[in-house]
Image (cartoon, rainbow, N blue to C red):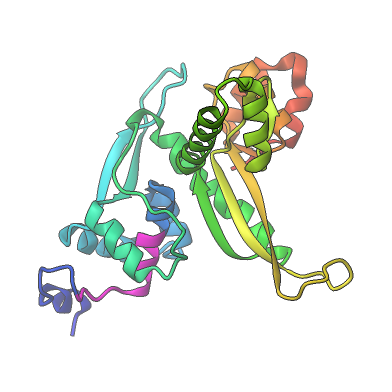
Amino acid sequence: MDQRSRRQALPQEIVGLSLREEERKTLAEVGRFRVITTRDLAETVYDNRHSRMERDLAFLREKGLVQVDAVNARRDGRGGKVDRIEVVTLTRAGRDVARQTSGLPQDQKLYSGLVKPREVEHDAQIYRAYRKEAERIERKGGTNLRVQLDFEIKSQVQKAIHAERKAAPERDMAEIKQQVARQFDLPYVNDGIQIPDARIEYDLPRDPDRDVDQGTRTSHDDIEVLTAAYRPGHLRAKAQAGFHVYASSSDRATLTAKIESDHYLMENILEL
């Protein structure tokens, strides 16, 4: 029987909904990163089987689990025709289903809804940077990858700063920020805590020559996606932070022109 016909016979209620492996993976990936382009979904989840992806997205939309939108690409001073990008986000119901079916760790935060449409192109590139970074992590033996987006990290940092100020109002703010930066293993540059676009946490096997305890050890890498909108000062701060920095080829060209006197900053920027 045609798979689509079988789906039509499913009850409309979300409870007991039967999902294919690619559909579960789509809900999980979109939930982790809030927004992903259909181009990236087709490449990473569907092995470039676009027709299969389109059928699955149509089904997930019908069930009220995802939203597919076409949004304008950012301008960043660029002239000419405005490009359109097709992106996928979860609904609240989709986020709840993803939590139940994804198999992700319970402490993995999942997101729903489209936030800041003007920044969608940048936010969608975070997933692309993650995939490149994840390949490098897995090559060195990293497993059980978890993701924290800047929304979550900022919230934790702000709560920690608030708690320290409340406990000791007379303390110098710079001292508090430096303490909190150390607490979260974040760089403190130019009197501010630098927060990456995403932090990838993962497990590594114990090194028997260095680690006394058995089992695994945890580590993390921080990634940042640069765009042509970055000001030179902002770019320098991110470079000094030691993040793994990515940019598209077109953004690299614009950034290079902005920091001709600091051309060495471009040497460690990886291409998306």
Of all residues shown, which one is farthest toward the right? 209
> Where in the figure is residue 126, as x and y percent of width and height?
51, 43
Q: Nearer the viewer, residue 240 or 176?
A: 176
Is most of the magenta stretch helix, strand or loop? helix
Q: Which residues are magenta?
A: 16-28
Specify the quadrant that holds the C terminus: top right
Q: Can residue 255 be seen here?
A: yes
The answer to if 22 sits in the magenta stretch is yes
The x and y percentages for residue 148 are 51, 49
Q: Is residue 122 left or right of residue 191?
A: left
Q: Nearer the viewer, residue 262 or 178?
A: 178
Residue furthest to the bottom: 1
- Return the x and y of residue 7 as percentages of the image width and height: 17, 74
Q: Is residue 162 above or below residue 256?
A: below
User: Is 146 displayed left or right of 237 in the figure?
Assistant: left
As drawn, 266 above or below 5: above
> 224 left or right of 188?
left
Is 149 placed above or below 168 here?
Answer: below
Does residue 207 appear left or right of residue 203 in this picture? right
Q: Quadrant of residue 217?
A: bottom right
Q: Quadrant of residue 191?
A: top right
Residue under the image location 27 percent in, 43 percent down: 69
Depth check: 187 or 23 in front?
A: 187
- Quadrant of the frame with the N terminus: bottom left
Determine the residue positioned at 36% across, 26% down: 82
* Residue 23 seen anywhere in this rendered image of the structure: no
- Figure disc tally: 0
x and y percentages locating residue 31 in the rendered image: 38, 54
Q: Is residue 18 magenta?
A: yes
Rendering quarter of residue 146 = bottom right
